[in-house]
Image (spheres, rainbow, N blue to C red):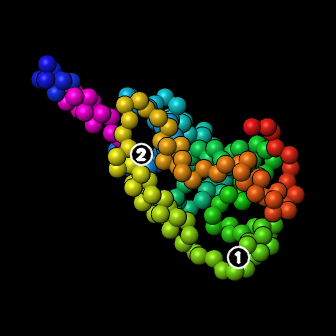
Amino acid sequence: MMPRALIILALVVLTACGSRQDTADRDTNLRQLRNPNGTPEEFSIVPPKPLQAPESLTELPTPTPGGSNRTDQTPLKDAVAALGGSPARLDPQQGIGAGDQALVARVSRFGRQANIREELAEADQAFRERRSLFNWRLVPQDTYNRIYRSQILDPYRTLEAARQAGAQTPSAPPR
């Protein structure tokens, strides 16, 4: 009886070890939207935009190594253009738009860190690595909610605290 129990336990342990995710894969996609069986994903293949001949050769931009191509898909810019916005405002080299300069000045009146995004990304990476040391399950679960469970705010408790502090708050749906 004892050897059978050890064999079953060994099989369960080996099965659990075989489903571990690669660290880079786990970090880039917390919501488990990847294809688990390793076959090509038909929705990740995006065809390029059609080629267009310019009116004259002087309209062609100078090629830049590593730069974008005129036929590359830009879904975010296409969505902004379809909704009537200016896709050029999404370019990082544009800087802060005129409409947002007052907001940025007000928010950064006490100073700001230039590398805050990199710093937060490193802290988040370290937090997720600490949380994933002994974090395996027999049944798959949403990684995002499991890792950040301790940081979720209770909206009703926060609303009640704001009301007790004297803040005017909108009504909330019942629990």
Does residue 54 show up? Answer: no
Q: Which one is nearer the viewer's eye here, 19 or 151? A: 151
Give yes or no for residue 151 being in the magenta stretch: no
For the stretch drawn in magenta, the main secondary structure is helix
For the record, the magenta segment spans 9-21
Q: Secondary structure at mark 2?
A: helix
Q: Residue at x 67, y 48 (%)?
A: 154
Left or right relative to 98: residue 38: left
Q: Position of residue 156 (x, y in %)?
A: 73, 47
Q: Could you tell me if the residues under marks 1 and 2 are in contact, i.e. CB atoms within 8 Å?
A: no
Disc 2 marks a residue whose amino acid type is: Arg
| The C terminus lies in quadrant | top right
Vertical comparison of 87 with 116: above or below: above
Disc 1 marks a residue whose amino acid type is: Ser
Vertical comparison of 3 with 160: above or below: above
Q: Residue at x 18, y 24 (%)?
A: 5
Residue denoted by label 2 = 26
Image disc number at residue 108: 1
Give yes or no for residue 19 being in the magenta stretch: yes
Q: Position of residue 81 (x, y in %)?
A: 75, 47
Quick one: which residue is furthest to the bottom in this view? 110
Left or right relative to 156: residue 121: left
Q: Residues within 10 Å of mark 1 (few under 14, many from 20)?
A: few
Q: Residues within 10 Å of mark 2 (few under 14, many from 20)?
A: some
Vertical comparison of 142 with 102: above or below: above
Q: Secondary structure at mark 1?
A: loop
Left or right relative to 117: residue 1: left
Q: Residue at x 56, y 70 (%)?
A: 116
Q: Which one is nearer the viewer's eye here, 63 or 7? A: 7
Q: Position of residue 19 (x, y in %)?
A: 32, 34
Which comes before the other along the chain, label 1 or label 2?
2
